[in-house]
Image: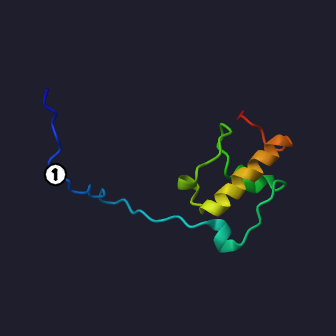
Amino acid sequence: MFRKVNVSNKRRKPRPGIVRFKKKCVFCQKKLEIDYKNIELLSRYVSSKGKMISRRISGNCAKHQRKISKEIKRARFLNLIPYVGR
């Protein structure tokens, strides 16, 4: 009937010992070129199961994440990168 409502709207305090920092886009810093033929670079952004690693985890900016996903799809189509992991 009645729902228990959390009365305190305080923000959660970070746990002691955990330091959070914002990841920087490697492509913006080092001016790297993203190409479908560079399999070593693209394989860093593909998990062991074959999924693309998200922007939140990789730390890329939106512009370069779109470019990476496009080039990974292109490399998969040309059979340079597998669609699924081993």
Label 1 secondary element: loop
Q: Quadrant of the C terminus?
A: top right
Spot the residue most to the front.
1
Residue 29: x percent and y percent? 64, 73
Where 19 falls versus 75 (above or below)? below
The amino acid sitting under disc 1 is: Ser
For the point 53% across and 64% down, the residue is 23
Residue 67: x percent and y percent? 71, 57
Does residue 46 appear to the left or right of 4 in the view shown? right
For the point 45% across and 65% down, the residue is 21
- Mark 1 burial class by Cα count in 10 Å: few <14, some 14-19, many 20+: few
Residue 42: x percent and y percent? 74, 53
Residue 43: x percent and y percent? 72, 49
**Along the line of sight, which residue is nearer the eye, 67 or 14?**
67
Does residue 86 appear to the left or right of 74 in the view shown? left
Does residue 33 appear to the left or right of 13 in the view shown? right
For the point 71% across and 72% down, the residue is 31
Where 23 falls versus 43 (above or below)? below
Q: How is the image coloured?
A: rainbow
Q: Quadrant of the N terminus?
A: top left
User: Which quadrant holds residue 17?
Assistant: bottom left
Q: Which residue is mark 1?
A: 8
